[in-house]
Image (cartoon, rainbow, N blue to C red):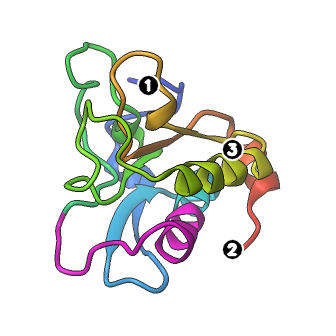
Amino acid sequence: MPVSQNGYTANDISLTRVYEIPGTDRRVRLRKGPAGELLVEFAAWFHVRIEPIDRGQLDDWGYAERPIRGGTSLSNHASGTAIDLNALRHPLGASGTFQAWQVQRIRRWLRTRHYCVRWGGDYSRRKDEMHWEIVRDVEACRRNLRGS
């Protein structure tokens, strides 16, 4: 069975479901259970505390069976354990698309969830500020769900 970069089983849509992001008109397909639920919790928080998830703009994504852009390993999107938000505002490779206060809040949220989620804006190579991905196991995600 193929796995994504973070070790989750990949390329199996039956392991995913469509979630509604509370407070938005956006629906995204993510992994069933705590990993997907934590990403939805983050997205709802992001919508209220960082910036609105654009209404009508179809630039928010979850599950996608594909390799990492420019690589051969399966993307965490392929396991439903990654989400992109407001991609047009935060394009791949761009840096500094968030204001300093937003970055501080994002990093605080990640810290309070014991870094179960990693932000693409913290990548050391090509920045991906639209991107958030699960980097810990299911049990760690379950322990860190707060219900927003």
Q: Residue at x 69, y 36 (%)?
A: 137
In the rendered image, residue 41 lying in the magenta stretch gets the answer yes
Q: Is residue 123 left or right of residue 129?
A: right
Q: Which residues are magenta?
A: 40-58
Q: Please, what secondary structure does the residue beneath circle 3 have?
A: helix
**Which of the two labelled residues, at mark 1 and mark 2, occupies the earlier sequence position?**
1
Q: What label sits on residue 108 in the rendered view?
A: none
Q: Residue at x 25, y 53 (%)?
A: 87
Q: Marks 1 and 3, Cα distance to the nearest angstrom? A: 15 Å
Q: Nearer the viewer, mark 1 or mark 2?
A: 2
Q: What label sits on residue 148 in the rendered view?
A: 2
Q: Nearer the viewer, mark 2 or mark 3?
A: 2
Query: Where residue 78 appears, x then y in whole percent?
Result: 34, 38
**Which of the two labelled residues, at mark 1 and mark 3, occupies the earlier sequence position?**
1
Figure check: 1 above or below 116: above
The amino acid at mark 2 is: Ser
Q: Please, what secondary structure does the residue beneath circle 2 have?
A: loop
Residue that badge 1 annotates: 3
- Pointer 1: residues within 10 angstroms few (<14), some, or many (20+)? some
For the N terminus, which image quadrant? top left
The amino acid at mark 1 is: Val
Q: Marks 1 and 2, Cα distance to the nearest angstrom? A: 29 Å
Q: Is residue 43 left or right of residue 77?
A: right
Q: Please, what secondary structure does the residue beneath circle 1 have?
A: loop
Q: Residue at x 35, y 47 (%)?
A: 97
Residue that badge 3 annotates: 138
Figure check: 80 above or below 39: above
- Pointer 3: residues within 10 angstroms few (<14), some, or many (20+)? some
The amino acid at mark 3 is: Val
For the C terminus, which image quadrant? bottom right
